[in-house]
Image (spheres, rainbow, N blue to C red):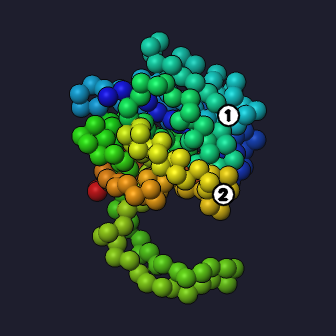
Amino acid sequence: MTVAAVLTAAGSGSRLGHVLPKALVPVAGAPLVAHAARALLDARAADGARVRALVVTAPAEHLAAVADALAHLAPADVPVTVVPGGATRQASVAAGLAALPADVDVVLVHDAARAFAPPELVARVVDAVRAGHDAVVPGLAVVDTVKRVASWDATGGPVLDTPPRDVLRAVQTPQGFARDVLLRAHAAGAGRAGDERTAASDDAGLVEADGGRVWVVPGDERAAKITTVRDVVLAEALHAAPVPGGAP
């Protein structure tokens, strides 16, 4: 099986309060997109398999800057392609999938906002797909009590129920898929992609909606999503002193 990755880096990152798009914001000495790409490229599956092609989606006006940030990261035999992202994350992933080489069997989808996901997490996802799971996501046990609400506005909303925490997982990226399964799920859900109100928040959700089964592997605290300035501070601390992966 040939492994490739789509790295989504087209977000504006407005909540970071930076003039640059999120993927180009420097953290721990390099842009977020470079950290995320390095983790994908450094990962080795149990049998030695590695990412053989990388497609990065970026803001249309920053394609050259993103390409520069990734220059010299990949081995000479791994093509890196930067393409414009779409109006939503789902649309951006679809654009990335369209640019993948034809011989790819396993596709990783990763968010540049989870820049410090370690290579061993990437490898864990690849191994699970290569073991026969069509769709794989990393997840961490939920430590907070979670309430399901019927509706929500500025004043709050009524609680429907309290799901037991032992059946809940906070899902991360990279997510891994058999290519044909992911392409079919994106085709089935294409009508949702143009609007943030309907677009899928992750690719596993599209597979679920298409009737597919998704397998969860243990996540890692270092794969936390970077959205705010506080997240940047925490990510830098975790990068400087890595912590063990989370429990399944």
Based on the displayed image, in which of its 4 quarters is residue 239 positioned? top left
Based on the displayed image, in which of its 4 quarters is residue 28 positioned? top right
Give, as a three-letter code, the residue at label 1: Pro
- Helix, strand or loop for disc 2: loop
Q: Residue furthest top?
A: 76
What distance separates the C-alpha of mark 1 from that of mark 2? Answer: 17 Å
**Mark 2 residue crowding within 10 angstroms, few (<14) / some (14–19) / many (20+):** some
Give, as a three-letter code, the residue at label 2: Glu
Image quadrant holding the N terminus, namely top left
Q: Nearer the viewer, residue 114 or 130?
A: 130
Horizontally, residue 20 falls left or right of residue 91, namely right
Q: Are marks 1 and 2 in contact (CB under 8 Å)?
A: no
Label 1 vs 2, first from the N-terminus: 1
Q: Nearer the viewer, residue 51 or 1?
A: 1
Q: Which residue occupies 53% across, 16% down?
A: 72
Q: Nearer the viewer, residue 215 or 110?
A: 215
Can you identify the residue that label 2 sits on? 196
Horizontally, residue 212 falls left or right of residue 233, namely left
* Residue 19 drawn at (x, y percent): 76, 41
* Residue 242 drawn at (x, y percent): 38, 42
- Helix, strand or loop for disc 1: strand
* Residue 119 drawn at (x, y percent): 37, 35
Based on the displayed image, in which of its 4 quarters is residue 99 positioned? top right
Q: Nearer the viewer, residue 140 or 107?
A: 107
Q: Is residue 248 above or below residue 134?
A: below
Q: Residue furthest bottom?
A: 158
Q: Is residue 109 above or below residue 76?
A: below
Can you identify the residue that label 1 sits on? 84
Q: Which residue occupies 59% across, 50% down?
A: 190
* Residue 91 drawn at (x, y percent): 62, 45
Q: Is residue 27 visible?
A: no
